[in-house]
Image (tube, rainbow, N blue to C red):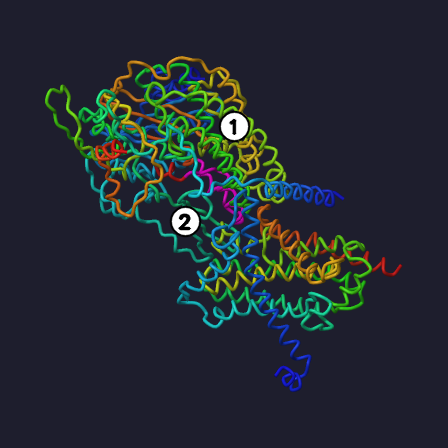
């Protein structure tokens, strides 16, 4: 007798499972048809880093070429930070800033330890390329491109 | 020209040949469409869209898949048993083609009404077990062998309830021919005439015969790579795959004929009703796959031998008793 | 408990140097200096008292090597550190793997990384490394591997077995565990023995820790266990804060609790999906991922990443949370509470699922101290052991919650415990949001170059898989001298050869799935 009760209880559990999937069948789709639809990126998203413009002189970055970010990076992704001291300035301005994005782990230590607050995270999430060399960003050149646009 | 051919060979032969060509086209188109249906159903159950890029609603997706499989390199591993290895995918398609000959799609749309129709279908479905065994043994691979042995045990165990659940219907009809069974149902479908449990038993045994979830242990992906068709690639794998879908269609078609009235129904032409009912059952089988986990192997055999077969026997005895009264 | 153990050792074991230490500074209560002659007696003493071996590691002090054993008790917190000095030239020590089974693997690891030979050990073969490495990696100087040792390390030969056949489960596994390879000896459908083979994802995090400063090592722990990343981050950060005596403001503690619990829920959701997918039901996987997307979106709003978060800093957080986070979390709590009924109907009450997991993989309660299991594995046997209650960290001592336990220790118990833990985590998050104080999110005056005082410290954290332990030895420079991670999946996986014996292979796979293993944290 208990066998029949077990079978009936088992059958009811199976049918209630099927009801769940039926409800899901008629429910709206939750996926996003990328690339025809895109999602909103939150403002704190960690893409690659970018240099921030100085408020008083918007054609130059805030970077003072101290090298703190280069020393603090755990993976050694910041390859070269060079700059020169212009006439009448107290601190250096950056001319070259090479970032190897292929080894960057987006930890945020460079952004945090920069004494001039010159670095910030960008929101580029769909960067693609066929060559590794395309990911050796020169952040000064990227900054200049953004200035023009 | 047609009249001359009919004069030479006779009307019946021409009709059978046209029917065979129709069945062949039906089998191929049906198998392709069932893959599309499965992907769409599974997609919507999982709250996503299935294929949608290739053609409207992804309808040309199966053809794209077929072209891809045709273009794949056909690898033959070195130590396989060549005759068995090559024969297995071919052999699995023969039972399905033969079974379609006797199924009545409409009053006059049956290739040949053999008077032992259901026996033909059951006999040829046992042949597919043989081809699975050939595939597993010939592959020279221990995973394939384990998968094939499991599949053989499962198929043999579930053929008995399959047969036993059809027998009451045959008792009530007094005939083995599929057309007669449908014609008798003009007074009422068998599913309403006391054969509801037989329908359930037949359906569960049919799902197990075709190796579908929850009984798909021979193809368990997370345990044994891919079971008996591990070593097959390209078009050979496609043949196994398509044979599985066509088997689902046959099981559903036989269930429709025996329990759901075949092509009977108001307003619409017969074959439209037949296809509606059959595809409804096919959709239910696919629904099972995406809802339930897998049954373990010893639980599977226990279920068949200890629960399904006694239930089918009891059903048979009760039907016999009711017929006598 | 600490006093009784101290007195017992003084009375029963003669000649053992034992001293009491400050738990708040060191993380352990008693420290014992032992010699090779009496180490076995000490270990047998602790085995008799029901202690479990929490960790076994080795530190290279150049003139000598020190083997460090940590013992702890499930019933009441009493952590004991036993230190054994061995010479650095041809080091050797007696094995304790006959008393504690888990020591088998710990000693293998120490042998291949440091070169310590353990007498009477049955199987000193490669665990993580391979033949092409010709020196002992974690030694401070370059010590080459001797020929005898190399022969000993290479002596694992699984092909020579006549009565049955071998099956390799993995390393490319269709179930989503990671790269785990299990060499299974089979007799028909039944398993005779199962031997996990590790090391496919070994990245030498412990060696990296010795070459980077404390701050620079911050991105590494989330990569060890990417599913419970915030808990690993938390373990690292709280250990260093304890070592340097940095106090964290209240607001940061509460936010750490909230985010760690969110991470726990997302890890358990993924496990539920993967576990049922192992058994053949492919749909709940998609449903749990849909719920998990909400958590990932919430955490992306504050931490910037979706999987490997680097959000906590020494003294607090990277940045503060805003109102959008609080609102989104409250909405998520309501949403997930409504989904539990659906999972119950689809999975928990399903008769096929129950038959697959009930009564399978039963772990007895008296076997637990031998293996040092933790997390849902130990709670399923009936022992209510949770680090959040025994050694509270962050804001857990100010929030009330209960610990779910099972009864017999089978797969179904582990499944029910994780579902229940998700519900409890939702309650914790709700209470923490209510009690969230305002204030600073980071301690002031944390030096940029952290130079902790000399000494060692051991601290534990409850990750979704179990007890995560961090042992740091500092020598007053800004890079750690030795950092050791005691991961929970390692000791949980050790019970698998015991549980898989005599089972069908489908059951063994279900049991392996119920442990919730993440292989990168085992391989580090």
- Label 1: chain? C
Horizontal side of residue B262 vs C203, given as left or right:
right
**Residue named by callout 2:** C172
Is C522 in front, or is C280? C280
Q: In which quarter of the image is residue C212?
A: top left
Expressed as whole percent of the image width and height from the top left, the position of residue B302 reads 65, 52
Q: Which mark is residue C492?
A: none
Range covered by the magenta-colored residues: C492-518
Q: Is residue C182 above or below residue C76?
A: below
- Secondary structure character of the magenta stretch overall: helix
| Other residues around mark 2 within 10 Å, as few (<14) / some (14–19) / many (≥20) | few
Q: In this view, does C346 lie above or below B117?
A: above
Q: Distance between the residues labelled 1 and 2?
A: 35 Å
Mark 1 secondary-structure assignment? helix
> Residue visible at 60% across and 38% down?
C348
Q: Closer to the observer: label 1 or label 2?
A: 1
> Residue visible at 55% across and 50% down?
B40
| Other residues around mark 1 within 10 Å, as few (<14) / some (14–19) / many (≥20) | some
**Residue named by callout 1:** C332
Q: Can residue C41 be seen in this view?
A: no
Is C254 in front, or is A58? A58
Expressed as whole percent of the image width and height from the top left, the position of residue C268 reads 49, 34
């Amino acid at each position: 007798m208990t066998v029949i009760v077990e079978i009936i209880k088992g059958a009811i559990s199976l049918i209630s499972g099927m009801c769940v999937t039926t409800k899901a069948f008629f429910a709206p789709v939750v996926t996003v048809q990328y690339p025809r639809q895109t999602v909103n990126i939150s403002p704190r998203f960690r893409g690659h880093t970018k240099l921030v413009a100085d408020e008083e002189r918007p054609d130059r970055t805030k970077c003072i070429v101290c090298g703190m970010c280069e020393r603090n990076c755990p993976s050694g992704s910041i390859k070269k930070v060079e700059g020169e001291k212009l006439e009448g300035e107290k601190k250096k301005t950056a001319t070259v800033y090479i970032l190897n994005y292929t080894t960057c782990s987006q930890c945020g230590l460079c952004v945090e330890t920069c004494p001039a607050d010159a670095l910030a995270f960008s929101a580029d999430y769909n960067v693609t390329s066929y060559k590794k060399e395309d990911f050796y960003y020169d952040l000064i050149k990227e900054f200049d491109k953004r200035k023009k646009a | 020209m047609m009249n001359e051919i009919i004069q030479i060979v006779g009307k019946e032969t021409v009709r059978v040949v046209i029917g065979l060509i129709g069945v062949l086209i039906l089998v191929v188109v049906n198998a392709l469409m069932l893959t599309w249906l499965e992907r769409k159903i599974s997609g919507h159950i999982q709250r996503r869209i299935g294929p949608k890029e290739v053609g409207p609603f992804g309808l040309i997706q199966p053809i794209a898949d077929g072209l891809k499989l045709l273009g794949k390199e056909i690898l033959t591993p070195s130590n396989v048993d060549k005759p068995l290895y090559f024969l297995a995918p071919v052999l699995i398609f023969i039972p399905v083609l033969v079974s379609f000959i006797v199924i009545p799609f409409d009053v006059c749309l049956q290739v040949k009404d053999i008077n032992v129709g259901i026996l033909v279908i059951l006999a040829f479905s046992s042949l597919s077990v043989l081809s699975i065994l050939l595939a597993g043994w010939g592959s020279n691979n221990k995973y394939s062998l384990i998968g094939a042995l499991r599949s053989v045990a499962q198929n043999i165990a579930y053929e008995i309830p399959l047969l036993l659940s059809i027998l009451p219907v045959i008792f009530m009809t007094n005939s083995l021919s599929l057309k007669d069974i449908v014609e008798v149902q003009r007074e009422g479908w068998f599913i309403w005439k006391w054969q509801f449990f037989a329908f359930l038993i037949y359906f569960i045994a049919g799902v197990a015969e075709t190796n579908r979830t929850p009984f798909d242990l021979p193809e368990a992906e997370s345990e044994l790579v891919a079971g008996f068709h591990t070593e097959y690639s390209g078009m050979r794998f496609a043949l196994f795959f398509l044979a599985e879908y066509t088997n689902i269609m046959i099981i559903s078609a036989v269930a429709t004929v025996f329990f759901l009235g075949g092509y009977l129904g108001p307003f619409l032409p017969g074959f439209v009703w037949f296809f509606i009912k059959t595809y409804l059952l096919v959709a239910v089988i696919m629904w099972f796959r995406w809802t339930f986990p897998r049954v373990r192997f010893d639980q599977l055999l226990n279920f068949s031998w200890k629960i399904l077969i006694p239930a089918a026997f009891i059903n048979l005895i009760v039907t016999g008793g009711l017929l006598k009264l | 408990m600490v006093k009784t153990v101290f007195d017992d050792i003084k009375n029963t074991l003669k000649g053992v140097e034992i001293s009491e230490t400050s738990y708040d500074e060191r993380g352990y209560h008693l420290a014992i200096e032992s010699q090779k002659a009496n180490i076995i007696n000490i270990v047998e003493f602790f085995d008799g008292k029901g202690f479990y071996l929490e960790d076994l590691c080795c530190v290279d002090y150049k003139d000598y090597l020190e083997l460090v054993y940590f013992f702890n008790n499930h019933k009441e917190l009493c952590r004991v550190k036993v230190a054994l000095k061995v010479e650095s030239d041809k080091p050797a020590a007696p094995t304790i793997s006959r008393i504690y089974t888990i020591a088998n693997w710990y000693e293998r690891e120490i042998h291949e990384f440091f070169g310590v030979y353990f007498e009477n050990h049955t199987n000193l073969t490669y665990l993580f490394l391979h033949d092409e490495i010709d020196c002992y990696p974690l030694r401070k100087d370059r010590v080459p591997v001797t020929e005898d040792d190399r022969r000993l390390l290479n002596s694992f030969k699984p092909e020579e077995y006549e009565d049955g056949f071998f099956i390799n489960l993995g390393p490319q596994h269709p179930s989503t565990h990671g790269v785990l390879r299990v060499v299974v000896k089979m007799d028909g459908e039944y398993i005779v023995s199962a031997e996990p083979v590790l090391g496919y994802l070994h990245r030498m995090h412990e060696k990296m820790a010795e070459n980077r400063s404390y701050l620079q090592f911050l991105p590494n722990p989330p990569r060890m266990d990417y599913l419970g990343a915030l808990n690993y981050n938390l373990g690292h950060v709280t250990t260093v804060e304890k070592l340097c005596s940095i106090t964290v403001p209240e607001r940061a503690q509460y936010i750490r609790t909230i985010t760690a619990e969110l991470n726990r829920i997302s890890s358990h959701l993924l496990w539920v999906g993967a576990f049922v997918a192992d058994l053949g039901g492919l749909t709940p996987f998609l449903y749990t991922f849909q719920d998990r997307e909400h958590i990932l979106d919430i955490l992306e709003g504050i931490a910037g990443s979706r999987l490997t978060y680097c959000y906590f800093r020494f003294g607090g957080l990277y940045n503060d949370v805003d109102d959008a986070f609080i609102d989104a979390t409250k909405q998520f709590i309501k949403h997930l509470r409504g989904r539990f009924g659906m999972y119950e109907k689809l999975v928990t009450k399903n008769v096929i699922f129950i038959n697959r997991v009930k009564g399978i993989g039963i772990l007895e309660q008296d076997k637990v101290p031998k293996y040092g299991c933790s997390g849902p594995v130990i709670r399923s046997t009936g022992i209510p052991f949770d680090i959040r209650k025994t050694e509270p960290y962050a804001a857990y001592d100010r929030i009330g919650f209960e610990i779910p336990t099972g009864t017999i220790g089978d797969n179904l118990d582990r499944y029910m415990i994780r579902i229940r833990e998700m519900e409890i985590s939702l309650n914790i998050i709700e209470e923490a949001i209510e009690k969230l104080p305002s204030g600073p999110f980071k301690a002031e005056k944390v030096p940029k170059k952290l130079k902790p005082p000399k000494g060692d410290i051991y601290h534990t954290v409850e990750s979704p898989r179990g007890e995560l332990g961090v042992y740091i030895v500092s020598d007053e420079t800004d890079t750690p001298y030795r950092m050791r991670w005691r991961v929970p999946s390692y000791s949980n996986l050790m019970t698998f050869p015991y549980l898989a014996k005599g089972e069908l292979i489908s059951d063994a796979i279900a049991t392996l799935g119920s442990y919730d293993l993440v292989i990168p944290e085992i391989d580090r």
